[in-house]
Amino acid sequence: MERIRVTDFHGKPQNYIAELDVTTDYLESHWGAHDVSMDDLGPWFTFAFTLPSGTLAALVREVENAPNPGYILTAIGKNGLPGTLEEFLAESGISADRVTRRGFE
């Protein structure tokens, strides 16, 4: 798994994969400072990656007024996204018990 610039995390479709119980401090201790991305809702703390499968994955959290604690794992892939959560967890070393909600793969 390789960390990429947030500007390299783009494409369609972008899929909600899961919510993870991790903090910004925890993520920064593993991957350095967060990036900030923007969308219609405003700014997001973002950690973006390329997985070995070629899927682009990012952990994102609204900078202000996040509705839930933790981060959302979102992904972009050309060939669908089955197994993305498992691949991300295995590559990142984040424990599966930190998954608080699964989304749609």
Image: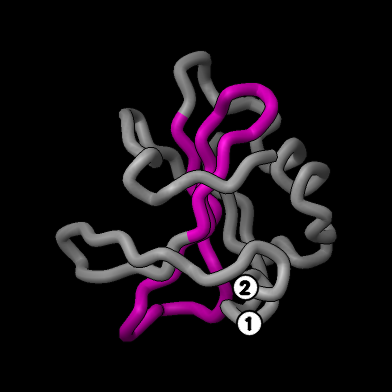
Quarter of the image that includes the C terminus: top right
Residue 28, disc: 2
**Front residue of this view, candidates 15 and 9:** 9
- Residue 75 higher or lower than 71, as above or below: above
Describe residue 30's horizontal placement relative to residue 3 as left or right. right
Residue 93, disc: none
Describe residue 10's horizontal placement relative to residue 38 as left or right. right
Quarter of the image that includes the N terminus: top right
Q: Residue at x 59, y 53 (%)?
A: 18
Q: Residue at x 78, y 43 (%)?
A: 91
The amino acid beneath tag 1 is Asp
Residue 25, disc: 1
Magenta stretch encompasses residue 82 = no
At mark 2, the secondary structure is helix
- Residue 103 higher or lower than 33, as above or below: above
Magenta stretch encompasses residue 75 = yes
The span from disc 1 to disc 2 (Cα, nearest Å) is 5 Å
Q: Residue furthest left?
A: 40
**Front residue of this view, candidates 100 and 32:** 32
How many numbered discs sit on the rendered protein?
2
Q: Residue at x 57, y 36 (%)?
A: 50
Instruction: Specify the segment rendered in magenta.
Output: 47-76
**Front residue of this view, candidates 14 and 5:** 5
Q: Residue 38, how many percent across, how many down? A: 24, 61
Q: Residue 15, how many percent across, how many down? A: 44, 39
Q: Quadrant of residue 63?
A: bottom left
- Residue 93 higher or lower than 80, as above or below: below
Q: Residue 94, how many percent across, how many down? A: 79, 59
